[in-house]
Amino acid sequence: MLRPSRTIPVTPWRADSTWSLGAGKHHIQRLAILFLGLTIFGIGEAFLVVTGLGNSPWVVLSEGISVHTVLNIGESTFLVSVLVLLLWIPLKQRPGFGTIANIVVIAAAIEVGLFFIPVVDNIFLKYFYVLFGIALVGAGSSLYITCGLGTGPRDGLMTGLHYRTGVRVGRVRLGIEIIAASTGAVLGGSLGVGTLLFALLIGQSVAISLGVVDRLTTK
C-alpha cells in the first residue's frame, strides 16, 4: 500500500548545501535525480495542457502569456519563473543550483512533452491524461525536492512571503496560486476541471511520491 509521507525523507543523495556540486560519493547520482525529477515534472504539466481541460495554475498563466506574445508555453514558463525569482530579492531569499535548474529544465520539458504527447479526443483518455499528469508532477517534485539543491522559484516565493508576513504557508500558497490562475485565465489560459483536480490532488500526489522514495531508500 502506498502511504503518504509527512516529512521530506533524508536520502543518500541529499546535498549538504544548495550549491553542493563538487565531487562526492553521490554527486553524479544527485544531479541525475535532480534533472530526472524536473523533466518528469515538466512532462506531467504537458499532459494537462494537451487535454484542454485546464492546466495547473502557473501553466494557466504561462499559456495566457503565450496567447498574447510570440512566446510558446515553455518559453512563457521560463519567463514567469525568472520574474518570480526576481521577487526573491526583496524577500532576501537565496537560490540554489536546483532553483536555476528548475527554471530551465521544466520549461524545456513542457515543450518536449507537447511535441511528443499525442492529442486525444476521448473524454476518458483526457481525464486519464489529467490524473497521470498530476501523478508525474508529484513524482517529479519528490525527486528534485529530496536532492536538497534549493526550491523552485514559486516555492521560494511562498516560503519568503510566509517568513516576511507570518501568514501560514498553506494560505500564502493558495493566494499565490489563485492570483496566477485568475490572471492567466483573463489572458486566455485554460482554466477548468483539470485545474481544480490539480489543486485538489497535487499535495497528496507529492506526499505519496515522497513516501515511495522514503521506502525505497530506507534500509
Image (cartoon, helix red, strand yellow):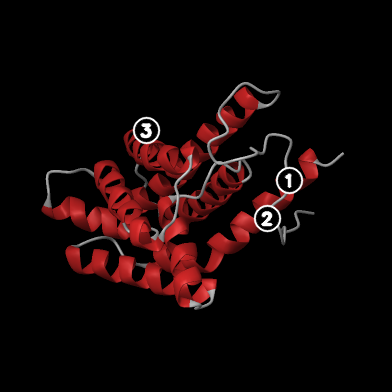
Residue sitting at x 36%, y 33%: 112
Residue 210 in picture, x, y percent from top left: 68, 51
Figure check: 27 above or below 216: above
Q: Amino acid at mark 2?
A: Ile
Please state the total of marks drawn on the protein image. Answer: 3
Q: Which residue is mark 3?
A: 116
Figure check: 130 above or below 118: below
**Which image quadrant: the N terminus?**
bottom right
Q: Which mark is residue 59?
A: none
Q: Which residue is mark 1?
A: 10
Residue 141 in picture, x, y percent from top left: 55, 48
Q: Is residue 213 visible?
A: yes
> Badge 1 local density, few (<14 within 10 Å), some, or many (20+)?
some
> Badge 3 local density, few (<14 within 10 Å), some, or many (20+)?
few
Please name which of the two marks, 1 or 2, marks the residue nearer to the observer. 1
Query: Closer to the N terminus: mark 3 or mark 1?
Result: 1
Figure check: 163 above or below 62: below
Query: Closer to the N terminus: mark 3 or mark 2?
Result: 3
SS label for mark 2? helix
Please name which of the two marks, 3 or 2, marks the residue nearer to the observer. 2
Q: Amino acid at mark 3?
A: Phe
Contact? badges 3 and 1 (CB < 8 Å):
no
Q: Amino acid at mark 1?
A: Val
Residue lying furthest right:
219
SS label for mark 1? loop
**Which image quadrant: the C terminus?**
top right
